[in-house]
Image (cartoon, rainbow, N blue to C red):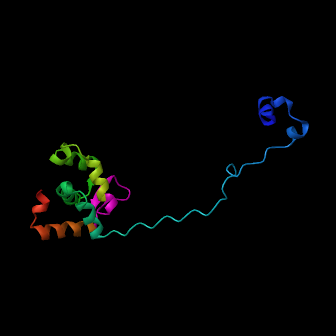
Amino acid sequence: RGLLRRSLFPGRRSEQEAKTPPAPSPEAAPPPLSEPEPEPEPEPVSEEGIRRRIEAEPAFRGPLLRLLEFCVTPRAEKDIYGWMRPFPEIRAGSHPPETLLLWMVEAGAIERLPGEESWRTTPVGKDTLVSYAAGSGDKTLET
């Protein structure tokens, strides 16, 4: 009953209670600073990694391989998107051209040329393209 009365009438506290600061709660104390964890090193670019990315989306295997073929010659980003927009897979609307380019960039199959606004297929991306063409008699590049 006395606790209830104190909480309802804060002006009636004793002078001793008023002078004593409340004890800090353990939750309010900031955590001690620690060393930031080092970022994991990126996975090295490999033909196998590019193949995994391509095979992760079977419906887009053809457009991804055509994208690698198209970017053997350096291309401006807007030209890549314009070239891909008529693809039936893109018109269906499940993934825009920007996503397909991003997939290939993340896999290490396509890179941005330093100091330029253009993109090109990496040497490992070219090797992947050649291995798909050799293994399927060029049919994969047309689908």
**Image coords of residue 120 (percent x, y):** 28, 59
Q: Which quadrant of the structure image shows residue 141?
A: bottom left
**Image coords of residue 90 (percent x, y):** 20, 46
Above/below status of 97 relative to 10 = below
Query: Which segment is the magenta one?
Result: 105-122
Which quadrant holds the C terminus?
bottom left
**Image coords of residue 37 (percent x, y):** 55, 64
Q: Residue at x 13, y 61 (%)?
A: 140
Residue 63 vs residue 60, the one in the foreground: 60
Is residue 76 at least partly visible in the picture? no
Q: Residue at x 9, y 67 (%)?
A: 137
Give yes or no for residue 111 being in the magenta stretch.
Answer: yes
Above/below status of 54 relative to 134 = above
Q: Is residue 52 left or right of residue 114?
A: left
Residue 102 vs residue 118, the one in the foreground: 102
Residue 116 vs residue 88, the one in the foreground: 88
For the image, the number of numbered tags is: 0
Which quadrant holds the N terminus?
top right
Above/below status of 26 relative to 42 = above
Give yes or no for residue 136 being in the magenta stretch.
Answer: no
Is residue 69 at least partly visible in the picture? yes
Which residue is at the far front?
A: 1
**Image coords of residue 41 (percent x, y):** 45, 67
Q: Residue at x 90, y 40 (%)?
A: 16
Q: Is residue 26 left or right of residue 143?
A: right
Q: Residue at x 90, y 36 (%)?
A: 15
Q: Which quadrant of the structure image shows residue 73?
A: bottom left
